[in-house]
Image (tube, rainbow, N blue to C red):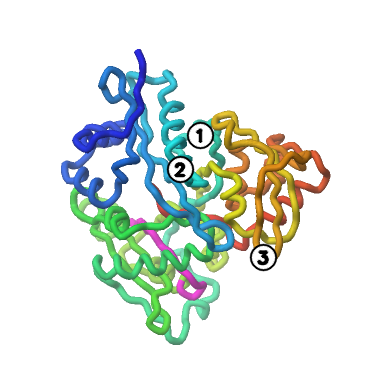
Amino acid sequence: MSIKYRVIAEDELQHWRSMVRRGFNAQIHPDEIERMRKDRADADRLFGAYEDGILVATGGTDSHVMSVPGGAELPTAAIAYVGTAATHRRRGLLTGMMRSLLDQSRDREEPLSVLWASESGIYSRYGFGQATFAEGWEIDPSRSAFAYMPHVSQAGGRLRFVEHDEALRIMPGVWKRAAGQRAGFLDRSARRWRYFFFDEEQVRGDWSGMFHVVYEYEGEPQAYAAYHLQPTAPGEDSNKMEVVECVATTDHAHAAIWRLLLDVDLVESVTAPIRPPDDPLWWMLADPRRLKRTPIDGIWARVIDPIKALSGRSYSAEGRLVIEVSDPFLPETGGVFELECAGDGADCRRSNSKPDISMSAADLGAVYLGGTRLTDLARAGRVVEHEGGSVRLFDRLFQTDRAPWCAHHF
């Protein structure tokens, strides 16, 4: 029987969302559909795969811009909601869905696509490479003393708790400034800030409501944190804390807000699920071994339009490379590209020249934001160097001061 891929109709959203949630072993709350329609979903970017009119697979895209090295922002398709009914496994439905989503992105002239992979073995076949890395943290706050306390204090700086509505006014400005400092940030519209910080009882489970704290320097917000608490046992005063999100734009703000988080009373463990791998907290602790750091995948990235993507970011040196990109899934986007980097920017164009380096679309996605070195991929046998020294030059061009990081889990 044939499968038809199409954008879902408005009256199909509840059934579609139920199937998405079932794929992740969860169920929806009745209020979730209206919240999603109002505050998150792009209705014309939600796809279903139908067999004889029956929904058998789902997928969709959130429209964003993403910060790239140098501080520019490029249109980016954030793929999510991907799932296949257990009754229809191994029939090529994911391949068909990914093609539908990426074709729509090409029609919209989005040069980049990103996703969080539920399984790391799935998406490289569609041209995605692991572009950012992250860490899950856990620490006993009683063992979290800083080695250098003066680093926390700063004349003109203050911490204060704010209520939910004020937090939603403050956090976007801090997020925007942080995006200018580090690649990998996705923008959030006002509606998506409401969606991701929705804090009602039906989504909390046995966690407390959200607490919001901001750090200001001379009246300007420079950091924020949102956290909630869960009792360690019924009737106990002791809690575990999860830091839902913490973003800072200066080192002083980072130190001050983390010192507050680690000093909250009646907390016996603090966790943070998505932290950047180069976060300086490890180096700030007097006993850094107490911080348990679990490496996790960050976002996986795909370059849909190499010319726009490579021309749109900045580079750390001057140089010229001819790069061959093989793209079996979308052959028309592959080819040979000449990248010329100068002090006033970069230019990328298709070329008939002999390539200096050959790589796959997935490997280009992995190195694009600067979070993965091409040298490491070459040592793994994934990249072919035709001209000696080209891999080293590539790494000099693509290196960034800070590791790319995506704090937005979509």
The amino acid sitting under disc 2 is Leu
Q: Quadrant of the N terminus?
A: top left
Q: Which residue is mark 3?
A: 344
Q: Which residue is mark 1?
A: 123
Q: Which residue is mark 2?
A: 115
Is residue 205 visible in this depiction of the protein? no
The amino acid sitting under disc 1 is Tyr
The amino acid sitting under disc 3 is Asp
Please state if 279 lies on the left or on the right of 64 as rendered.
right
Magenta span of residues: 240-253
Ranked by sequence position, the earlier of labels 3 and 2 is 2
Q: Is residue 123 above or below residue 208?
A: above
* Residue 33 falls in image quadrant: top left
Q: CA distance from mark 2 to mark 1?
A: 9 Å
Query: Which x, y percent locates residue 291?
Result: 50, 57
Q: Confirm or deny contact between disc 2 and disc 1 (CB under 8 A).
A: yes
User: Of helix, strand and loop, which mostly describes the magenta segment?
Assistant: strand
Residue name at image x 20 percent, y 54 percent: 200
